[in-house]
Amino acid sequence: MKQFISLIKTEFRRIFSNSVLVAIFFGAPVLYGLMFIQVYKKGKVAEMAIVVIDEDNTPMSAKIIDALNDNENLTVAKVQFDAGNIAAEMPSKEYVSVISIPKEFEADILQKRYPELMVDVNTANLVTANFASRAIQTVLGTFSAGVEIESLKKAGMDHATALQRYEPFKVNYNRFYNPSGNYLYLMLPGILGTIMQQVIFLGLGLVFARDFEDGYFNKLVKTSRSSLYHILLKLTPFLLLTAAMWMVVGSFYFIYRIDIPVFSIQMAALVTLFSLACMFIGMLFSLAIPNQLKATELLMVLATPSFILSGYTWPLEGMPVLIQRFADILPLTHFLQGFRKLSVYGGTFRDIQPQMMALGIITIVSFVLIALLLQLKIRNTKNQVVTQ
């Protein structure tokens, strides 16, 4: 035991002697986490620039413009009274929408000819397009209802009857789970999970590769011929360091008052199994590719598309079957699915059982491969020593 503790201390010294690893392992989750919180802090896109082409130029069209400008998500950046050439301005101005009010719009409304407003939405960015479309629909729908009710009242109908005549039945929409449409609640868990997977991959991708390169593995083999001993030796420091980083990452939710429950027994179990799966994959690459640069490069190639392939923002069901199967071997896929079930839906252990089983399989398969490959390398190293 004394020897094991001494070797653990040596492992910590070797970890902290690698300034690049320390900077990435500890700096990336903190710095990137804080940066992305600031990026998505508002949760919504506000004051998106729109253009109104007002060919009617009447009091009613002016009211529509005022109503659009009063919406918190929109700002009327420009009003012009002819069609002009808005397309020429789009590359520099990037208006999210162009709303065209036709000639004789007010007159057509008063004479019940049902004129048509044209709303062109810029879908180059689907996020701003969705926010803008919803805001414009709300404003114009409310305005349209108000005009119809006022028309009925002018025809002699009382206010209550006018409301009932315009709206013969009511439809109530209740938005469950992130009802405010806060983008921070959607993106932050996915981004932080992706960052943690990558830094764990990087940290464990170096543990054996570095030992093979500088000859330290030959010294370790003399202490024990058991692959399990060496796996535990390499794993222990990163278990402690990773747990500390998860606590730091989890504290962001409290510091910035993000209403997502992250400290629970279920979440702790999910995070632990996710971390172990990432560690063993990283360790497996470190053994299979005994070169620090190549091992980390291949791990980054594996990790880079993981967020897109996880199904977190685009459903897995919409991807080709081959890509779905590839996504299944990535720990992040199952972690984010489980995280959403726990944090958003308020799920239980039973709800995340498929994700826990998938992470468990990844962990066990990687562990068995590591044990076999490491035992082979220990035997080969011993044979080389005897031969020499």
Image (cartoon, rainbow, N blue to C red):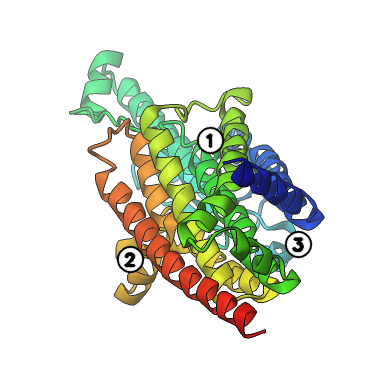
The earlier-in-sequence mark between 2 and 1 is 1
Instruction: Give whichever of 112, 122 is nearer the camera.
Output: 122
- Please give the label number shown on residue 92: 3
The earlier-in-sequence mark between 3 and 2 is 3
Q: Position of residue 283 (x, y in %)?
A: 54, 62
Q: Position of residue 265 (x, y in %)?
A: 38, 28
Asked whether the viewer can see residue 152, the reply is yes
Instruction: Give whichever of 115, 212 is nearer the camera.
Output: 212
Q: Residue at x 60, y 65 (%)?
A: 221
- What amino acid is at disc 3? Ser
Q: Residue at x 63, y 61 (%)?
A: 220
The earlier-in-sequence mark between 1 and 3 is 1
Q: Residue at x 57, y 51 (%)?
A: 233
Name the residue carrying label 1. Answer: 60
Q: Which quadrant: the C terminus?
A: bottom right
Disc 2 element: helix
Q: Quadrant of residue 36?
A: top right
Name the residue carrying label 2. Answer: 318
Q: Residue at x 55, y 43 (%)?
A: 239
Circles 1 and 3: CB atoms closer than 8 Å: no
How many C-alpha atoms fall within 10 Å of the one at disc 3: few (<14), some, or many (≥20)? Answer: few
Left/right placement of residue 330 relative to residue 99 reads left
